[in-house]
Amino acid sequence: MSLFVVWCLMSVGNDNALWDESRLADPHAQPDKAHRVQGMFDAIAPTYELINRLFSGGRDGAWRRAAVKLAKVTGDDDVLDVACGTGDFARAFRDGRITPRRVVGSDFAAQMLIRAAERDQTSMRWVQSDAQKLPYRDGSFSIVSCAFGVRNFQDLDSGLGEMQRVLRDGGRAIILEFSRPPNAIMRAIYEFYSSKVMPIGATLVSGDKTGAYRYLPKSVVSFPDVASFVERLRGVGFSRVETRSLTMGVVTIYAAYK
Ligand SMILES: C[S@@+](CC[C@H](N)C(=O)[O-])C[C@H]1O[C@@H](n2cnc3c(N)ncnc32)[C@H](O)[C@@H]1O
């Protein structure tokens, strides 16, 4: 039996899928997107990191390290990693060339956070909270980071606004997110891989039944492009935004200053 047939059998007729074809037509417009995102990440948490390593060809760690480098961390920095998942980005901050004073990871998916806490409960703090309503006073952190999280927010502007609110003046938001390669050939190759190859492979390896790996490519192509996202960051009050494109534009780092 071909992999494609196996994938069809796993996806079609699965009434429990959080992301079915009708919802995937416009994933960001779903009124209960947050609920579906949370359920999806709770379900895929056990194999989340393995899938990232396998299907990014081991690049995801380098992407996070490049973002940490752009943050120009000092020993006086207090870092809040929003939508921290299993903690890969927060750990990259802790393990960078200079260790910040404090690293806190926050996420609303308990199963992701449990895995983060299993790794480290001493040098970092893990907090279950919604990025749309962060439980911190204005100006509490000097760096607010988010890797592959903002695309999943129910309301992008209010999530970015919360990141800006909890930053102190002079602080920076460091955001890592998938983007669409500007080169047409590269874009076609990458989008064939991410919409056809990756969903089958990742669904098979993870045993996912939520539709998570079909949501991923759809949520990327329907997310604001780099220029529009920079405007959204300015729109919530960031004064200056730098971008750096990685892996021929598959991923972009945004450094937004308050
Ligand atoms: C693709 S994972 C990224 C995890 C981690 N940042 C990393 O680099 O691997 C996205 C994470 O965003 C979290 N998330 C999405 N929307 C959220 C929200 N509104 N509040 C808190 N966490 C959220 C999900 O639960 C999930 O753990």
Image: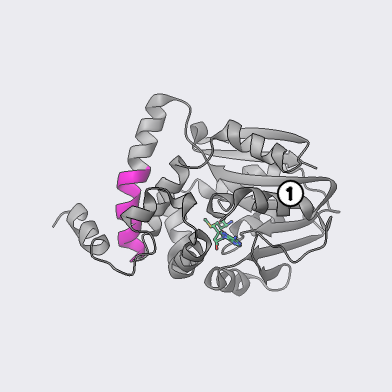
Question: Circle 1 sits in a helix, a strand or a loop, which is it?
Answer: loop
Image quadrant containing the N terminus = bottom left
Quick check: 187 left or right of 172? left
Residue most extreme to the left: 1
- The answer to whether residue 98 is visible is no
Residue 226 counted in the magenta span: no
Quick check: 92 left or right of 49? right
Residue 200 counted in the magenta span: yes
Principal SS element in the magenta part?
Answer: helix
- Which picture quadrant has residue 21? bottom left
In the image, residue 148 sits, relative to residue 108, either above or below, namely above
Which of these two is toward me, 230 or 145?
230
The three-letter amino acid code for the residue at tag 1 is Arg
The residue positioned 74% from the left and 66% from the top of the image is: 135
Image quadrant containing the C terminus = top right
State the image coordinates of residue 25 (x, y, percent, origin top left): 37, 48
State the image coordinates of residue 27 (x, y, percent, origin top left): 44, 51
Find disc 1 in the rendering and name its residue: 97
Quick check: 108 left or right of 4? right
Quick check: 247 left or right of 147? left
State the image coordinates of residue 193 (x, y, percent, origin top left): 34, 41
Quarter of the rendered structure image containing ligand 1: bottom right
The residue positioned 43% from the left and 51% from the top of the image is: 216
The residue positioned 46% from the left and 42% from the top of the image is: 222
Which of these two is toward me, 210 or 92?
210
Residue range (magenta): 194-207
The residue positioned 73% from the left and 49% from the top of the image is: 97
- Which picture quadrant has residue 128? bottom right
